[in-house]
Image (cartoon, grey):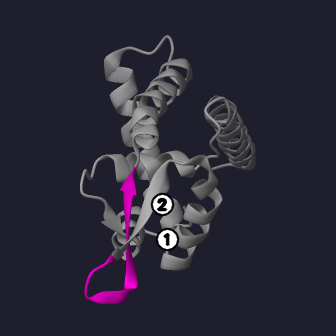
């Protein structure tokens, strides 16, 4: 890769990543959420019986303290309830409230709007190729940086 290609690739990746994150924050902000909180709530919403904090962490691929901090930030919103687990004083089950369940379709609509905006004008085949290429880029980047989402 010559240096002009290096510059073009770096510039394109940085610009797209920054714009995507900004657009995502704007759409989620309209729901009262920050990026990352949507995925946590959506994951919880797929489990009608709730989840233990360590299960959430495993599912999201993050550390348990990260989930605990995220839940603390979300708690005032009334999206979920914390319930003790009988027989395990240290464990807490997180279950969605009606309010929490009601925001799941809105999160999915925000995701759809963002994906449709980002891929507007692309054919279904081009969208498939784009996703494949982005997954390849992600895999390449994992060789130099651990996943930190």
| Residue annotated with mark 2 | 140
Q: Main secondary structure of the magenta part?
A: strand
Q: Secondary structure at mark 1?
A: loop
The image position of residue 75, as x and y in percent, is 58, 57
The image position of residue 51, as x and y in percent, is 32, 64
Q: Residues within 10 Å of mark 2 (few under 14, many from 20)?
A: few
The answer to whether 109 is drawn above or below residue 139 in the figure is: above
The image position of residue 139, as x and y in percent, is 43, 59
The image position of residue 125, as x and y in percent, is 31, 21
The answer to whether marks 1 and 2 mark residues whose Cβ atoms lie closer than 8 Å is yes
Nearer to the camera, 27 or 124? 27
User: What residue is drawn where x is 41% and y is 47%?
Assistant: 97
The answer to whether 41 is drawn above or below residue 124 in the figure is: below
Residue 93 located within the stretch drawn in magenta: yes
Nearer to the camera, 123 or 103? 103
Residue 16 located within the stretch drawn in magenta: no
Q: Is residue 145 visible?
A: no
The answer to whether 95 is drawn above or below residue 124 in the figure is: below
Q: Is residue 74 visible?
A: yes
Read off the magenta span.
85-96
Q: Residues within 10 Å of mark 1 (few under 14, many from 20)?
A: few
Quick check: 22 left or right of 138? right
Nearer to the camera, 80 or 69? 80
Any mark on residue 143, and which?
Answer: 1
Any mark on residue 100, and which?
Answer: none
Give the Cα distance between marks 1 and 2: 6 Å
User: What residue is drawn where x is 45% and y is 42%?
Assistant: 100
Q: Secondary structure at mark 2?
A: helix
């Amino acid at each position: 890769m010559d240096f002009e290609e290096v510059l073009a690739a770096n510039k394109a990746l940085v610009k797209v990543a920054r714009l995507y994150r900004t657009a995502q924050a704007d759409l989620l902000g309209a729901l009262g959420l920050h990026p990352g909180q949507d995925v946590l709530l959506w994951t919880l919403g797929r489990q009608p019986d709730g989840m233990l904090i360590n299960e959430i962490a495993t599912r999201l691929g993050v550390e348990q303290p990260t989930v605990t901090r995220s839940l603390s930030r979300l708690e005032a919103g009334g999206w979920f309830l914390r319930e003790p687990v009988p027989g395990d004083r240290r464990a807490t089950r997180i279950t969605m409230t009606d309010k929490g369940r009601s925001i799941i379709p809105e999160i999915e609509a925000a995701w759809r709007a963002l994906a449709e905006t980002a891929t507007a004008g692309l054919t279904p085949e081009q969208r498939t190729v784009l996703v494949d290429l982005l997954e390849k880029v992600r895999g390449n980047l994992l060789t130099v940086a651990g996943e930190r989402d």
